Amino acid sequence: MTDDLLRITGLRAGYPRRRIIDGLSLPPLRAGTVAALVGPNGAGKTTLLRALAGLLPATGDVRYDGQALLQMTPAERARYVTYMPQSLPQGIALSVIESVVTALRVSTLVKDRPESLVHAEADAVLQRLGIGHLALSPLDELSGGQRQLVSLAQSIVRRPRILLLDEPTSALDPRHQIDVMQAVTETAKTEGMIVLAVLHDLNLALRWVDMVVLLSEGALAAAGTPEDAITAETLAAFYRISGRVERCSLGLPHILFDGKIRD
């Protein structure tokens, strides 16, 4: 019997001289859930993603569908988890479509599939993210925001069970932020994927995600629906800003910021 849950219990992770996360436990995350990791700088958000991806030493109990992820080899974990860093490495001599096809080939999802079908699947992801017109462009000629969208395409096309996104909207204009969040939420629902995304834009979190996980100093400060976790009280306590959540004329929640709280 499968439960398709990601369970994180007692996680410890960090660096040789500094432990960033010490005994972190999160509510279970179910397939199809998009969760935003929020919190002030240095809260441990990226550390958590890197630990789950196997890029940092970690201890504790992390299980997906009952499988212990921390005990897996890198190859075994890659069957379940894909991590999208904040930026693509430079100097990759590939076009956009070639880079996405390569990511798809590495995933083994398309073993023995005709090349035309592989390219069609890669192109469909690019179109969904609004960058189909860049398919033949060299990666090194793209802007930072365009490279970020390509990195997301490489991650989504692999159809992992757990998708870890480190600030996927940070370099994007408002239109492409919407493209990204819409693609991520739709993919999570249709593929039964669990998404953990570091977001600094709290209004994006309020609008698009199912759950907000607020971290502070490597510990869980709040978790729940966006409007349960992002409140005037948590804004004041953890961000040191004065603000409140209201609803616009369309009924969508958004934050009105009043200013910083003086210490």
Image (cartoon, rainbow, N blue to C red):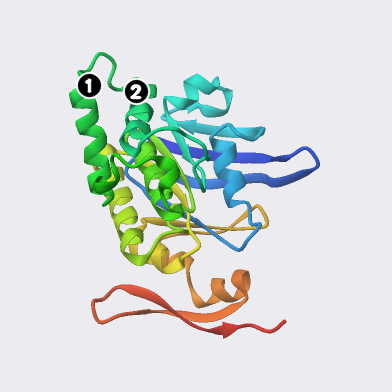
Specify the quadrant of the image occupied by residue 156: top left
Specify the quadrant of the image occupied by residue 110: top left
Residue 245 position, x and y percent, is 42, 77
Residue 78 position, x and y percent, is 46, 26
Q: Which badge, 2 or 1, is on the more N-terminal residue?
A: 2
Secondary structure, mark 2, is helix
Residue drawn at (33%, 59%) of the image: 176
The furthest residue to the top: 112
Residue underneath mark 1? 115
**Nearer-the-camera pick, 6 or 170:** 170
What's under tag 2, amino acid-wise? Arg
- Res 110 visible: yes
Badge 1: few (under 14), some or many (20 or more) residues near its Cα, within 10 Å?
few
Secondary structure, mark 1, is helix
**Nearer-the-camera pick, 119 or 64:** 119
Specify the quadrant that holds the C terminus.
Answer: bottom right
Number of numbered discs visible in the structure rendering: 2
Badge 2: few (under 14), some or many (20 or more) residues near its Cα, within 10 Å?
some
User: Which mark, by number, is residue 105?
Assistant: 2
Specify the quadrant of the image occupied by residue 189: top left
Residue drawn at (28%, 41%) of the image: 135
